[in-house]
Image (cartoon, rainbow, N blue to C red):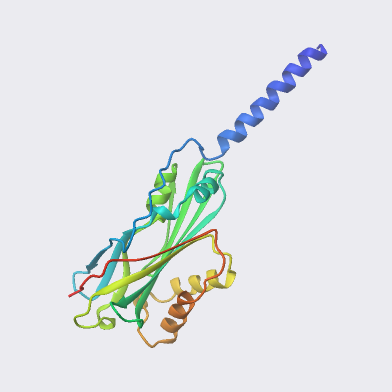
Amino acid sequence: MSKRGCRRRAGAWLAGCLLGTTLALPASAQEVPVPAPPSGPREARFEWDAARRWLFVSLAFRDVADAGVLRKLKLGLPTTIVLTGILYAQGTEQPLASTLQNCKITWHVWEEMYRVEVNRPDQQTVRQWSPTLNGVLRRCAQTEHLPVAHVSQLPEDKPLLLRVKVLVNPVSQELLHKIQSWISRPSNTASASTGSILFSTFTGLFMTQLGEADRVLEFTTRPFNPR
């Protein structure tokens, strides 16, 4: 075979390898709009279970996925999104209850899909697959029916609000370990009672500096009357 033919074959082989590598990565052409952050308190949906014993919240925080976060997801880099929330009576600084959601996102080359692992205090780890970033954000940048508090933790007739902090890729391993401990506790303590060691540990951790992260988003929900 001539030298020119060898060069052509080598060039074709290299192009094929590069093409295969490109196909193995998440499709960077996926356009995911970055919503503008709302001004002021945010809307959230609070609701009781049928027995009116547990209070749940549903809310969205897709603006946590700014251009930098989306770029890392499109490159297939492992990403963790942690939502923490502490419930207060309006006009007071004494925490009433707390909750969290932890979401791990990994890109799997062979399946060409994102694997999403969601951990919450009211259920075992939920593992799902998504071929798109929109599907990832639907699972990790919003939460549905997340337990917030037991009725025994709430005052009789005061409006309540939830202070939320969302972290993307927190650096502290101690933080991640405590999050895992919080999630893995018995399911009948989905929101630790006020005054307990577990409650004090959790609220104390998230009321203070949480350490470095790729991105931190903080907001407060609009006041609502649970009664």
Q: Position of residue 177 (x, y in %)?
A: 54, 72
Q: Position of residue 48 (x, y in %)?
A: 22, 69
Name above or below for residue 50 compared with residue 198: above
Name above or below for residue 38 compared with residue 13: below
- Residue located at (78% from left, 17% from top): 6
Question: How many numbered discs sit on the rendered protein?
Answer: 0
Q: Nearer the viewer, residue 9 or 142?
A: 142
Name above or below for residue 119 compared with residue 137: below
- Residue located at (36% from left, 70% from top): 163
Name above or below for residue 203 compared with residue 48: below
Q: Residue furthest bottom?
A: 195
Left or right of 79 on screen, residue 198: left
Q: Position of residue 199 (x, y in %)?
A: 41, 82
- Residue located at (38% from left, 48% from top): 35
Left or right of 48 on screen, residue 36: right
Q: Residue furthest front?
A: 39
Q: Position of residue 20 (x, y in %)?
A: 61, 32
Q: Nearer the viewer, residue 85 or 5?
A: 85
- State which quarter of the image contains the N terminus: top right
Q: Nearer the viewer, residue 78 or 129?
A: 78
Q: Nearer the viewer, residue 181 or 155?
A: 155
Query: Which quadrant of the figure has residue 211?
Result: bottom right
- Residue located at (41% from left, 47% from top): 34
- State which quarter of the image contains the C terminus: bottom left
